[in-house]
């Protein structure tokens, strides 16, 4: 189901993908993922795609709906590209 032109929400039966596959498939997008498998060091390794969009705020509604239906599920929201523009140095 497409909720906006820039946002896509996947059905609950979507396949399980690795984070690397998602980064390749949805470059420079925000992704909302239901975590189905972690690595031993607790990094997110794979999951079921819930929604993706170029605009981070488009994931809010998808997150709220998913959380209401799956309160115990673990979710992961991340950006698949570089957050800081090229040439910008971030100092923490």
Image: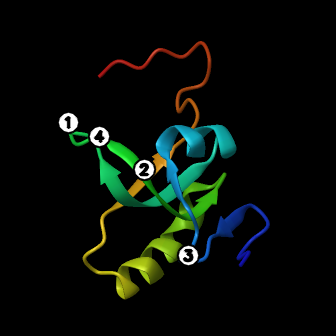
**What residue would you read off at disc 1?**
41
Residue indicated by mark 3: 13
Q: Quadrant of residue 6?
A: bottom right
Residue found 53% across the figure and 27% down from its top: 84
Look at the numbered disc 1 and give the secondary structure of its residue. Answer: loop
Sequence-first disc among 1 and 2 = 1
Q: Is residue 27 visible?
A: no
Q: Which residue is mark 4?
A: 43
Could you give the CA–CA distance between mark 2 and mark 4, rounded to whole angstroms? 9 Å
**Viewer-side residue, 10 vs 6:** 10
Residue drawn at 42 percent across, 20 percent down: 90
Does residue 53 appear to the left or right of 59 in the view shown?
right
Category of crowding for the residue at label 2, using alpha-carbon neighbours closer than 10 angstroms: few (below 14), some (14–19), many (at least 20): many
* Disc 4 to disc 1: CB gap under 8 Å: yes
Nearer to me, 29 or 87: 29
Task: Give the residue at mark 2.
Answer: 46
């Amino acid at each position: 189901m497409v909720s906006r032109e820039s946002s896509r929400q996947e059905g609950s039966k979507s396949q399980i993908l690795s984070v690397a596959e998602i980064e390749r498939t949805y470059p420079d997008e925000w992704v909302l993922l239901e975590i189905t498998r972690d690595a031993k060091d607790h990094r997110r390794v794979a999951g079921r795609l819930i929604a993706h969009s170029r605009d981070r705020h488009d994931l809010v509604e998808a997150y709220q709906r998913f959380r209401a239906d799956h309160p115990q599920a673990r979710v992961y929201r991340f950006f698949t590209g570089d957050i800081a523009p090229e040439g910008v140095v971030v100092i923490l």
